[in-house]
Structures are given as structure tokens and as C-alpha cells.
Image (spheres, rainbow, N blue to C red):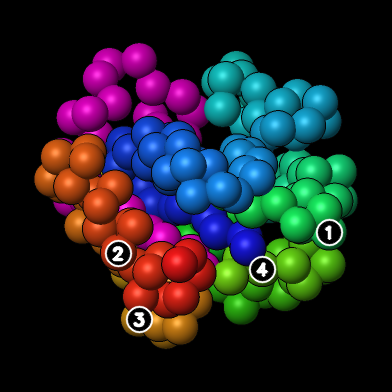
């Protein structure tokens, strides 16, 4: 089973990935968690370039290809071997984020991003993507003042990103489910559990 959690900055993805991993382990699953970009030596180096190096000038297409490169490495080095070994994989972001951030947010052509992503991942897609949704003002307030290169972009950019996630969910209801993440952490976690049971992904 391969599940990704996604959504805008500040919605609580990492927290929910951790809670979900703990719960699935309690149910007897062997769980691999990974973050996109990251989780491999190459991926973490690319993550530093993308998020921390605000001194670097980076055109949008270069940014997009760096995300794709990190994901390609993660798929081949970590995700495919884990799935082949019967593990459950939980990803903190995946291809959908690339499509939404550089497409809806940045203005690159969405269809082309999906095509490039298919090449980068070898066609490996999650069984389910859960999008955590929080209004932009509330999500950005959770981030505080210290923000990475992407988080520091304008409110308008983040609003386009949020709408992009919602639009993709409307277009792919079998693959993408939106969860209201404005409530308490445990309430959101329980909602995610419920979705996995409804989708028959867990017993």
C-alpha cells in the first residue's frame, strides 16, 4: 500500500504522516515513511537547494526538474523496494505537489507536469492521496516568521496552490481525497483513519 499526504504549507502533513505511521504499525504493518523532496542522500541535497538556498536564482522550470529528480531517486532507491518487500509506504508529498506548486501556483502547464512526473516516477502513483486543507491565512499563521524559499512566497501564490489541490481532487475523486485539517490534530487523524477504512485499505 502506498499513500501520500499532501496540501499547502502549514496544513500539518508531517504531523499526520507520523500519527498515521504509528497507527498502521499498531495494526501490524511494516511502514516506510519518506518526504518529497528528500529521504535519500541526493534528495536531501536537492531539498537544501530548493528550500534553503534563498541566495540562488532559480527559474521555475529548473525548480520543477529538481523536484522531479529528487522524486525519481526516492522512487527507485526507497519506494519500489519497500513495496516489493510488502511494506506500506507513507509519503509526505509526492507528484501532486509538483503539479500544483509549479503548475497552478507557478504557471507551468499542468498536463505537461503530469507527463514529466510519469517519466520521473516510472508511472508509480499512490493508491490514495490525502490532501489536508486549511484556509491560506490560517495555514501561513502556523508557519511563524521563519520560512523557507517556497513558504516565503506571496499569499496569492499560496491561494493558487490551495485552489490547485482542490481542483485536482475534484478531477480525480477516486485517487485524491480532501480532509478538512482546521480542527484538532487527533480529530484530523481520526478522519484519515476513517477514510482508509472506507476505501478498504485497512481492516
The relative height of residue 198 versus residue 148 in the rendered view (above or below) is: below
Label 3: state its secondary structure: helix
User: Which of the two discs, 3 and 2, sits closer to the camera?
Assistant: 2
Q: Residues within 10 Å of mark 1 (few under 14, many from 20)?
A: few
Q: Are marks 3 and 2 in contact (CB under 8 Å)?
A: no
In front of the other: 113 or 166: 166
Residue named by callout 4: 125
> What segment is highlighted magenta in the picture?
128-154
Q: Are marks 3 and 4 in contact (CB under 8 Å)?
A: no
User: Which of the two discs, 1 and 3, sits closer to the camera?
Assistant: 1
Q: Earlier in the sequence, mark 3 or mark 2?
A: 3
Q: Residues within 10 Å of mark 4 (few under 14, many from 20)?
A: some
Label 1: state its secondary structure: helix
Quadrant where the C terminus is found in the figure:
bottom left
Q: Earlier in the sequence, mark 2 or mark 4?
A: 4
| CA distance for labels 4 and 1 | 14 Å
Q: Residues within 10 Å of mark 3 (few under 14, many from 20)?
A: some
Q: Earlier in the sequence, mark 4 or mark 1?
A: 1
Quadrant where the N terminus is found in the figure:
bottom right
Residue 5 location (% of width, % of height): 46, 52
Label 4: state its secondary structure: loop
| Residue 170 marker | 3
| Residue 133 marker | none
Q: Earlier in the sequence, mark 3 or mark 4?
A: 4
Residue named by callout 1: 84
Amino acid at each position: 500500500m502506498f499513500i501520500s499526504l499532501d496540501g499547502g504549507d502549514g496544513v500539518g502533513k508531517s504531523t499526520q504522516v507520523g500519527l498515521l505511521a504509528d497507527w498502521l504499525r499498531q495494526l501490524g504493518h511494516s511502514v516506510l515513511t519518506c518526504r518529497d523532496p528528500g529521504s535519500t542522500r541526493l534528495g536531501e541535497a536537492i531539498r537544501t537547494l530548493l528550500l534553503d538556498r534563498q541566495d540562488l536564482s532559480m527559474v521555475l522550470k529548473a525548480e520543477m526538474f529538481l523536484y522531479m529528480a529528487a522524486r525519481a531517486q526516492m522512487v527507485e532507491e526507497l519506494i519500489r523496494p519497500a513495496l516489493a518487500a510488502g511494506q506500506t509506504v507513507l509519503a509526505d508529498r509526492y507528484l501532486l505537489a509538483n503539479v500544483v506548486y509549479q503548475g497552478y501556483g507557478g504557471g507551468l502547464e499542468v498536463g505537461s507536469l503530469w507527463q514529466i512526473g510519469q517519466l520521473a516516477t516510472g508511472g508509480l502513483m499512490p493508491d490514495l492521496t490525502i490532501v489536508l486543507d486549511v484556509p491560506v491565512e490560517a495555514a501561513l499563521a502556523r508557519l511563524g516568521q521563519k520560512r523557507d524559499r517556497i513558504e516565503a512566497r506571496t499569499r496569492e501564490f499560496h491561494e493558487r496552490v490551495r485552489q490547485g489541490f482542490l481542483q485536482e481532487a475534484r478531477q480525480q475523486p477516486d485517487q485524491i481525497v480532501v480532509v478538512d485539517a482546521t480542527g484538532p490534530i487527533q480529530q484530523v487523524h481520526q478522519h484519515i483513519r476513517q477514510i482508509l477504512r472506507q476505501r478498504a485499505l485497512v481492516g
